[in-house]
Image: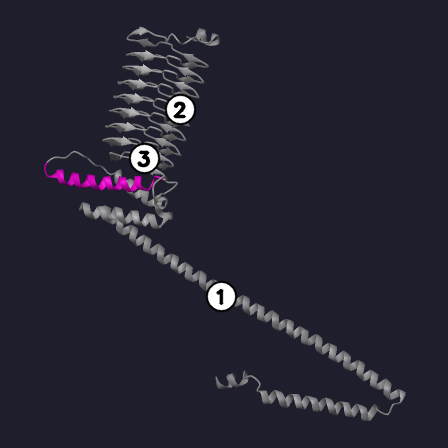
């Protein structure tokens, strides 16, 4: 080790000075010898001196060229060493970043697993702690929000009977509080117009198919795809101003209390096939941009579609309106099909616009029916319609000549 250090030791100032003196002496001696040999001034001596000078110039030029090559080589080596060091630094930084990322992911996974385990706990306070832990985890880690929303939704889809007696009454009440908290976590983070924009979780899908939901309030929320098929809505359901930006399903859903969808927006296809509204249902000023299906829907209370805009195809076939049906100033921009609909009480279509086909085939009207100032555009039919058992066609309806023979 000592020999290696001595071999790589730098030249001292004394060695450099001695070498310079020796070099000067060698040059002086060389010049003296040249002058002694060829310094007599004859033409031959001058020619020899000129030859020596030329050879010296060539040698000096070659030496300079070699020096340039050595300098370029040193520069290349230095740049290569610098690039190597820089690359090594980047690799170390990337390794450190990967290590930090892996540590963070492990921490998130540990927290997630712990919170998920808490949701399965027997005691309600532990389940509540698990929900709040998941909420905090989703708030701090946007990439995991959809997964956590899926977990909370899966919890709400678990079987639950809200009415229990005896020894199960307390457990049922505690579970109700846990479920209400889960709903509030979802609704609190799905409203972009809230006071705290950072709490908004954007571009999420929601799957609550078959869930039991209690007094659900999705005011001014924004969802992508939403599935509420076979869901059971207890108490009042309020989705005022909600925006469904993807497909929306309420197939066979049951609304046991009032259902409010006023000013809601349904961007894509919307299905209420077989949905049951046991109390009043309000869709005032809602907008349906895609195809909308209320096939075999049952409205046991009043149904309000006042100023509702149906931009896509609408199907109400075999729907039952046991209460009043209010469609005043609604607009149907595409085809509207209402075959086999049963209006048990009043049905108002005042100032309604049918821009395309409208089929009222085998419709039963049971109360006051009003089509005042309605606008019929294309193929509109009232084939087989009855009012209190008597054949019925509104006085305001005049069939277009090309369709008159079809009715």
Looking at the rendered structure, the secondary structure element under dot 1 is helix
User: Residue 209 placed where, x, y %?
Assistant: 30, 34
Looking at the rendered structure, the secondary structure element under dot 3 is loop
- The vertical placement of 173 against 115, above or below, is above
- Alpha carbon of mark 1 to alpha carbon of mark 2: how far? 63 Å
Q: Mark 2 or mark 3, which is nearer the start of the sequence?
A: 3
The colour scheme used here is one colour
- Alpha carbon of mark 3 to alpha carbon of mark 2: how far? 20 Å
Which residue is at 47% across, 63% downward? Answer: 91
Viewer-proximal residue, 6 or 254?
A: 254
Magenta region, residue range: 166-191
Q: Which residue position is annotated with label 1?
A: 88
Q: Mark 2 or mark 1, which is nearer the start of the sequence?
A: 1
Viewer-proximal residue, 158 or 165?
A: 165
Q: Is residue 376 magenta?
A: no
Principal secondary structure, stretch drawn in magenta? helix
Viewer-proximal residue, 197 or 98?
A: 197
Q: Picture quarter containing residue 374?
A: top left
Q: Which mark is residue 219?
A: 3
- Alpha carbon of mark 3 to alpha carbon of mark 1: how far? 54 Å
Q: Which mark is residue 309?
A: 2
Q: Mark 1 or mark 3, which is nearer the start of the sequence?
A: 1
Which label lies toward us, 3 or 1? 3
Which label lies toward us, 1 or 2? 2
Circle 3 packing at 10 Å, graded few (<14), some (14-19), many (20+), is: many
């Amino acid at each position: 080790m000592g020999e290696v250090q001595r071999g790589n030791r730098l030249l001292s100032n004394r060695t450099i000075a001695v070498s310079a003196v020796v070099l000067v002496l060698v040059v002086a001696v060389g010049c003296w010898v040249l002058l002694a040999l060829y310094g007599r001034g004859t033409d031959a001596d001058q020619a020899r001196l000129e030859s020596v000078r030329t050879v010296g110039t060539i040698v000096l030029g070659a030496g300079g060229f070699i020096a340039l090559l050595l300098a370029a080589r040193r520069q290349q080596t230095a740049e290569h060493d610098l690039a190597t060091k820089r690359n090594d630094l980047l690799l170390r930084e990337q390794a450190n970043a990967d290590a930090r990322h892996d540590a963070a992911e492990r921490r998130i996974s540990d927290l997630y697993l712990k919170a998920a385990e808490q949701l399965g706990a027997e005691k309600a306070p532990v389940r509540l702690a698990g929900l709040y832990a998941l909420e905090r985890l989703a708030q701090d880690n946007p990439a995991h929000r959809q997964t956590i929303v899926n977990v909370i939704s899966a919890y709400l889809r678990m079987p639950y009977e809200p009415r229990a007696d005896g020894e199960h009454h307390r457990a049922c009440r505690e579970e109700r509080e846990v479920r209400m908290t889960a709903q509030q976590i979802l609704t609190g983070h799905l409203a972009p117009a809230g006071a705290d924009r950072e709490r908004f979780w954007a571009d999420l899908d929601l799957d609550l198919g078959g869930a039991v939901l209690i007094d659900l309030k999705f005011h001014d929320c924004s969802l992508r795809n939403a599935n509420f098929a076979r869901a059971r809505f207890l108490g009042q359901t309020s989705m005022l101003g909600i925006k469904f930006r993807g497909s929306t399903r309420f197939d066979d859903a049951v609304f046991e209390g009032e259902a409010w969808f006023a000013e809601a927006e349904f961007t894509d296809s919307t299905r209420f096939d077989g949905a049951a509204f046991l109390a009043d249902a309000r869709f005032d000023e809602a907008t349906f941009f895609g195809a909308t299906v209320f096939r075999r829907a049952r409205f046991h209370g009043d149904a309000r579609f006042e100023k509702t805009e149906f931009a896509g195809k609408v199907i109400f076939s075999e729907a039952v309106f046991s209460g009043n049906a209010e469609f005043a100033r609604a607009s149907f921009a595409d085809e509207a099909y209402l075959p086999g609909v049963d209006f048990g009480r009043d049905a108002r279509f005042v100032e309604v616009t049918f821009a395309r086909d409208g089929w009222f085939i085998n419709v039963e009207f049971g109360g006051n029916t009003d089509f005042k100032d309605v606008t019929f555009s294309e193929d509109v039919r009232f084939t087989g319609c009855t009012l209190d058992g008597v054949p019925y066609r509104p006085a305001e309806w005049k069939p277009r000549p090309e369709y008159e023979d079809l009715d």
